[in-house]
Image (spheres, grey):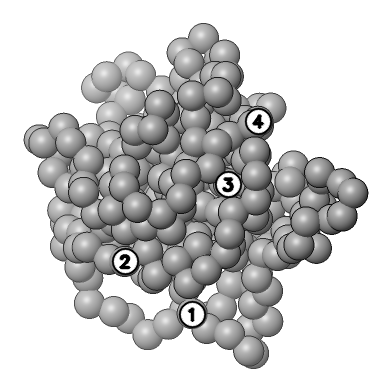
Amino acid sequence: MLCGAFLLLAIVSCGAQEVSNSTNELYTVSAAELPSPASTEARIIGGSPTTIQSYPFTVQVLYYLQLTCGGSLLTRRHVLSAGHCFVDDYGNVASPTPFSIRAGTSNLNSGGTVYYVSTIIVHESYNTPVRDNDVAVLVLTRSVTLSTSVQTALIPMQGATLRDNSSVVAVGWGRTNVNIPSASSVLNEVTVRTVNRTVCQQRYNELEAITLDPYPVTDSMLCAGLLDIGGADACQGDSGGPLVYNGIVVGVTSWGYSCALARFPGVYTKVSYYTNWINSTV
């Protein structure tokens, strides 16, 4: 993570201690300025195991205590994830009762601490068929305990943009093989590159012409992959998890055509498009 000159500010919870004689805590989210691009790194084809200490803001979103999506800890009481993880095909938002998060562990469905969800806030303009505005904030029933393996995330300032071909890292417990329908037993990371949105839309226009299904890539989305190479991507089970640039969560895993195909990059919710919304929600 680059610090100092770039004025990175952590997402903080104001009054981290419980307020006496009150069950409420007040939270604010401070955004981070995106640092200048680092030097070009070698491309990593496919993912590799990592540790929660490397991405301590990453959490598992559980449905009846089983992995359903990923998320990023915004404050001690709030988690950033994808709207489609909590909305059915008819636009109905799920009850929070079956949902919880597991924080502070590299292992799937074990270790760390489980915190239950009290409220699910899906963006009011979320569009189910095309996954536009695919962002949600979960409110937890109690505050998480921070440690070396549990930390709040950094998010970009409103409107911040990344240069095309920037190196970014997708993190999650999702599939490591598109042909094997089981999640990874440990946290994985994969390095990919941001893809120009116009190029990304052109690729998905080709798919629209074949399938007759809509695949719009809007201003609120960010594309990333190894274009025309393939072999590296987020996959099923990673939805809602972070896409990270120099320690800042710049994307939320949203959708794509299959996984890791050379022609079709993955599509992520662009966090900087929603920084103000996030601030107004927590």
Whether residues under marks 4 and 3 lie with C-beta atoms below 8 angstroms apart, the answer is no
Tell me the residue that label 3 is attached to: 79
Q: For mark 1, what is the residue? A: 1
Task: Give the residue pinned by disc 4.
Answer: 119
**In this rendering, would 167 be left or right of 281?**
left
The answer for how far apart the CA atoms under marks 1 and 3 are is 21 Å
Q: Nearer the viewer, mark 1 or mark 3?
A: 3
Q: Are marks 1 and 4 in contact (CB under 8 Å)?
A: no
- Gap in Å between the C-alphas at discs 1 and 2? 16 Å
Among numbered discs 2 and 4, the one appearing first in the sequence: 2
Task: Check disc 1: other Cα within 10 Å, few if <14, some if 14-19, many if 20+.
Answer: few
Residue 9 position within the rendered picture, expressed as x and y whole percent measured from the top left: 68, 74
How packed is label 4: few (under 14 Cα within 10 Å), some, or many (20 or more)?
some
Q: Which residue is mark 2?
A: 51
Give the CA separation, mark 2 to mark 4. Answer: 29 Å
Give the residue at x 16% y 53%: 231
Of the two numbered discs 1 and 2 in the rendering, the one whose residue sits closer to the viewer? 2
Q: Which residue corresponds to the image point at 46% horizontal and 50% vertical from the top-left?
A: 113
Q: Mark 1 or mark 3, which has the lower sequence index?
A: 1
Among numbered discs 1 and 4, the one appearing first in the sequence? 1
Q: Are marks 3 and 2 in contact (CB under 8 Å)?
A: no
Which circle's residue, 4 or 3, is located before the other in the chain? 3
Q: What is the x, y in percent for residue 51? A: 31, 66
Cα separation between marks 1 and 4: 32 Å
Q: Residues within 10 Å of mark 2 (few under 14, many from 20)?
A: some
